[in-house]
Image: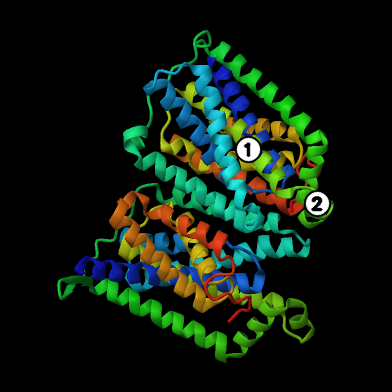
């Protein structure tokens, strides 16, 4: 029983990071219809720049976080502007987007390897450990869950209540109609890349603090984010968040039964069964909500 | 110097095999099989384990490597009726990660990250030059078979599936069976390439079948052009020329790998943006 509870706590911790990744991806997908795998680079840069400015250069963590977010968001926006928007002008087809996003992911991955090396990067942050009924949770983990929850709540407020959210939902629903109604869909796409990349950068920072940094994690996180998206039903932010927790839980169960070596490939097993058995996702919403 | 050239030429020929089989799935059939390297790894491990652990001689192990990769290729194609486009790509990328996890974690068979060592070159082909001739022969046979396949009526069915699956289906073509056949054939040849690579390098580990070969194959096929076997071979040669010319610059060896990936992928982005047909391709990227 205690193990089960600890598993659930670990799943919530991992899930709240995956939720940031998955909801960022959903944001981007909804307006641009791109499976933005290169989002992994944005996450990776968030973590690595944060580590570099704080641990290597020795500045304050707040400044490091700002730098990380600026670099990541700029990267996300540049990728959209230089590559995706150019492709959109040329009316590129799906395979072209897929290849360019994979290429961007690999370029970013290699860039991080070049700049920061292949060794694991750890933050030696020790925070208090709290124990409830023999369950362990650190202060860092509590902060992580709170930050993630607050961000996701803000996000859902933006989508539901603001003008930008409305314009975004319109763009997601039907780009041409939105354009006719006077919505500048191109700017909406830019904004959604901005918001999505912001979430990715913060996810990268939190992951660094909690799980260490590894150059391969960008690829894994992008795919886990997609798995979460598919589980929840592509295009639904609530679904993506729910899917993220399922991915987290499934991974923890796999680690418990089979060992940590299988953790990163578990998301695919889940992806496979969902695509095969329930391709519309759990909530089966086609609309962006 | 001669030995070095033979080494590079052998690698070029092995990658040529990887690229033309990749093009059969991606260029002709429109299945972006990002798990291609996973299939190659299966072929390599099957061949390496059969020869080092179970006393098989090279040729039966070589054929079994192809067959086992073909079986997995066909299995990957099975759900392709429901799982298409981007989803198929993600799924097959996932397959690659799963095979890698199996290579790492099934230590009793694969020796985990240590990898399989002491893989022997086949008898009579231990000399690098003769081994190169063997690889070249396999490449030539594969090229002829694939060329026959894509210019046959079956090849036109594949291209019809790529261009519009529903149209192909409404013309009474068995889309599902064609996809499975294409993936099995593609898997068979990439399995053979894995076996050749294992016996060429004489040691393999899970890192051999990670993202680098995928990057290389993807770059070669897109640069050379979709739906052109000749283009894929040209692509592989170009990719190797770029990659080997990096040796002439004084770059620390630890940086060469990432730098190579960046160059290939930058070229890929340029091709996708400004020349979607590649050098010799007949199909747009779709």
* Front position in the image: A77 or A274: A274
Q: Left or right: where does residue A4 sit relative to residue A44?
A: left
- Name the subunit of mark 1: B
Q: Left or right: where does residue A27 sit relative to residue A87?
A: left
Q: Quadrant of residue B158?
A: top right
Question: Secondary structure under badge 1?
Answer: helix
The dot on residue B168 is: 2
The dot on residue B184 is: 1
Q: Is residue A222 above or below residue A161?
A: above
How far across and how far down the image is residue A190, in percent?
Answer: 63, 73
Q: CA distance from mark 1 to mark 2?
A: 20 Å
How far across and how far down the image is residue A235, in percent?
Answer: 59, 74
Dividing the image into 4 quarters, which one contains the C terminus of chain A? bottom right
Q: Quadrant of residue B247?
A: top right
Q: How is the image coloured?
A: rainbow
* Front position in the image: A132 or A192: A132
Q: Give me the residue at 79% from left, 53% from top.
A: B169
* Label whose residue precedes the other's in the sequence (1 or 2): 2
């Amino acid at each position: 029983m205690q193990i089960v509870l600890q598993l659930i706590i670990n799943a919530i911790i991992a899930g709240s990071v995956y939720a940031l990744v998955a909801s960022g991806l959903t944001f981007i997908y909804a307006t641009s219809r791109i499976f933005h795998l290169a989002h992994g680079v944005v996450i990776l840069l968030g973590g690595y720049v944060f580590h570099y400015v704080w641990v290597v250069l020795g500045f304050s963590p707040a400044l490091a976080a700002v730098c990380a977010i600026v670099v990541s968001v700029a990267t996300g926006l540049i990728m959209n502007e230089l590559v995706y928007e150019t492709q959109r002008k040329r009316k590129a087809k799906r395979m072209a987007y897929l290849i360019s996003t994979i290429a961007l992911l690999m370029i970013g991955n290699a860039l991080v390897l070049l700049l920061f090396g292949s060794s694991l990067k750890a933050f030696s942050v020790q925070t208090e450990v709290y124990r409830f009924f023999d369950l362990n949770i650190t202060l860092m983990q509590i902060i992580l869950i709170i930050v993630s929850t607050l961000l996701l709540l803000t996000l859902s407020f933006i989508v539901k209540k603001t003008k930008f959210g409305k314009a975004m939902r319109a763009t997601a629903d039907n780009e041409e109609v939105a354009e006719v109604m006077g919505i500048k869909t191109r700017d909406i796409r830019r904004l959604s890349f901005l918001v999505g990349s912001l979430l990715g950068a913060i996810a990268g920072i939190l992951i660094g603090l909690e799980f260490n940094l590894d150059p391969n994690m960008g690829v894994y996180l992008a795919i886990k984010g997609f798995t979460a998206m598919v589980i929840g039903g592509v295009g639904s932010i609530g679904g993506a968040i729910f899917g993220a927790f399922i991915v987290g839980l499934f991974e923890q169960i796999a680690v418990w039964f089979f060992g940590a070596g299988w953790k990163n490939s578990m998301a695919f097993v889940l992806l496979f069964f969902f695509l095969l058995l329930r391709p519309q996702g759990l909530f089966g919403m086609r609309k962006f909500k | 110097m001669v030995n070095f050239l033979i080494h590079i030429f052998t690698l070029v020929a092995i990658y040529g095999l990887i690229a033309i089989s990749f093009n059969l799935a991606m260029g002709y059939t429109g299945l972006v099989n990002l798990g291609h390297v996973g299939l190659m790894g299966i072929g390599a491990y099957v061949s390496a384990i059969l020869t080092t652990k179970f006393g098989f001689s090279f040729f039966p192990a070589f054929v079994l490597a192809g067959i086992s990769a073909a079986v997995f290729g066909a299995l990957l194609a099975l759900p392709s009726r429901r799982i298409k486009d981007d989803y198929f790509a993600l799924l097959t990328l996932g397959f690659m990660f799963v095979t890698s996890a199996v290579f790492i974690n099934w230590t009793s068979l694969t020796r985990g990250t240590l990898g399989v060592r002491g893989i022997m070159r086949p008898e009579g082909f231990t000399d690098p030059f003769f081994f190169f001739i063997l690889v070249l022969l396999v490449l030539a046979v594969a090229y002829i078979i694939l060329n026959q396949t894509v210019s046959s009526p079956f090849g036109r069915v594949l291209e019809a599936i790529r261009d519009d699956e529903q149209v192909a289906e409404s013309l009474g073509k068995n889309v599902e069976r064609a996809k499975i056949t294409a993936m099995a054939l593609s898997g068979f040849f990439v399995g053979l390439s894995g076996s050749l690579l294992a016996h060429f390098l004489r040691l393999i580990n899970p890192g051999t079948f990670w993202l680098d070969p995928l990057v290389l194959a993807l770059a070669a096929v897109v640069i050379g052009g979709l739906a052109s076997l000749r283009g894929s071979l040209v692509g592989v040669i170009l990719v190797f020329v770029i990659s080997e010319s990096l040796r002439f610059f004084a770059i620390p060896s630890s940086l060469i790998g990432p730098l190579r990936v960046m160059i290939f992928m930058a070229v890929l982005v340029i091709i996708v943006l400004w020349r979607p047909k590649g050098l010799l391709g007949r199909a747009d990227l779709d």
